[in-house]
Amino acid sequence: MKDEDVSCQEIPFVFFIILSFVKLPEGGIRLYSIGVDIGTSTTEIIISNIKISTRLGPSLLPTTKIDETEVIYRSPVIFTPLISRDAIDFEQIRERVKAAMKESGIDKENIETGAVIITGETARKDNARQVNIWLSEYLGDFVVATAGPRLEAVLAGKGAGISEESKRRSRRIINLDIGGGTLNAAVFDSGMCTDSFAMDIGGRLIKLDDTGGVTYISDRIAHIITSHKLAIRQGESADIKVLERFCDYLADCCLQALGLCEMNEDTLPLYITDFTIPKNLDFISISGGVGEYVGSLNEMKDQAEWFQYGDIGPLLGIKITQALAPYKSRLIIPEEKIRATVIGAGNHALSVSGSTVGVEPSILPMRNIPIVKCPAVASQWEDVYRSTRPLMELYEDEVLAVSIKGEKSPGYGEIKLLADQIARLYEGLNSPVIVLLKEDFAKALSQMIRIHTPCSKPVICLDQIQVEEGDYIDIGSPVGSAVPVVIKTLVYQ
């Protein structure tokens, strides 16, 4: 059938006739997912069983969703092994992962997805990026290496159960995940993450030996010690009262970040991400290793317990509890605390693109693909090439994905216009065509590019994908009729 023989009005009719013969899988598909969190203080591993199913949605289009996740293995929490102050011990971590596989009874070959996330101060180690990539490659084709404080904040909030709690209550809840090196905050409004930020606040910013001597002070908080004239020096014993004053200040910084008291100039340098103060919060949740001690004021009267891990983590948790006492009615206890990030990495890093996608399985999986956001809106598709090609040329010979703003139900002519623009975009570039859409017309667009443009490259079009400037995407091999993806920000310092 020729182009001119098919009118725009006839396309939906033909499509629905074809759709009526589509057999959707019964019972869904199950796969194993691994989460590895290599944090400032601790390293944890979980293995989960994830069920993915496809069903007809309200518009009679197949919709693929993650139905349920079940954590079937939790590793013991171990201190993150280091070779030196500036390097991670990869061999020890790999041996711990091997032990987790053996203990769980799940073979490495059966792990189909998951995430290795290096968080907090550990992400700043000299070999952090390489360790992350080595470990993800060791574990499988679509176990991804991720980092970045904003992503960590979102994963921790989801792993702590705050995303679901926010959805259930239809309220704005902020989750502060406070570990050894960083505070990662995510605001969830009726289940959706609307804001995130990170700060250098954590329980292992000061380390102590068995005698109370200071063995480590993070450079990130040196200005606080100086400006408040605190007698905390590496190689010397620290008075408990002085450490309490320091933790009092960090707890006050948390209140400032929550917008509960006036911002102090010493707090601003602690922000890792852009400065932001969330507004109209209904509830507050605190997860992470320090979160284990928030609310435990009456349980830790013995000062010996404050430094049982060779750091200030428990003391900081107690001081945050005291600082939040006036807001106790707004404090909720998360489902997970110390394991929130690793559960988020194992269960929530993965999402699935819609079933109406166009993919070339032979080139999948693909990792760490930079995403270029097209500046043109849907009404300006004729401007896609002119506005976006200069942005793509900045990446030279890299494989690239383009995120394009679409219309909900574009017509035949509009899709053909966009296909022509995309084909031009990728001319002369050493990259397959990879297009990311929020709306559900990826399959139609991929077919239009293949059939009605001179483009001879492999084409991947994914829908139901929402990204921000500077994001990367990992694309896995198809799982049934869906494509697993991870949107992430790679940040190593």
Image (tube, rainbow, N blue to C red):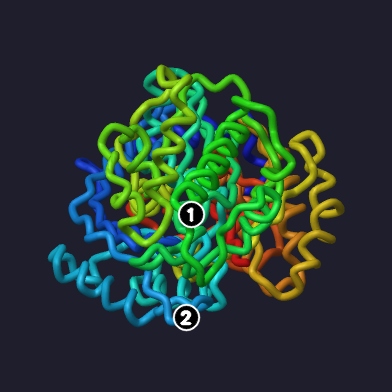
Looking at the picture, does residue 464 appear above or below residue 226?
above
Q: Earlier in the sequence, mark 1 or mark 2?
A: 2
Q: Residue at x 15, y 71 (%)?
A: 102
Residue underneath mark 1 = 486
Residue underneath mark 2 = 84
- Residue 159 is at least partly visible in this image: yes
Question: In the figure, residue 411 lies in which quadrant?
Answer: top right
Q: Residue at x 65, y 51 (%)?
A: 224
Looking at the picture, does residue 251 appear above or below residue 426?
above
What's the residue type where badge 1 is placed? Val
Q: Residue 120 at what x, y percent from top left? A: 51, 58
Q: Nearer the viewer, residue 11 or 183?
A: 183
What's the residue type where badge 2 is placed? Ser
Dot 1: what SS?
A: strand
Dot 2: what SS?
A: strand
Looking at the picture, does residue 36 appear above or below residue 5?
below
Q: Residue 250 at what x, y percent from top left? A: 55, 43
Q: Nearer the viewer, residue 461 or 353?
A: 353
Q: Which mark is residue 57?
A: none
Q: Is residue 113 left or right of residue 177?
A: left
Q: Residue at x 70, y 50 (%)?
A: 227
- Dot 1: few (<14), some (14–19), or many (≥20) neighbours within 10 Å? many
> What quarter of the picture does the C terminus occupy?
bottom right
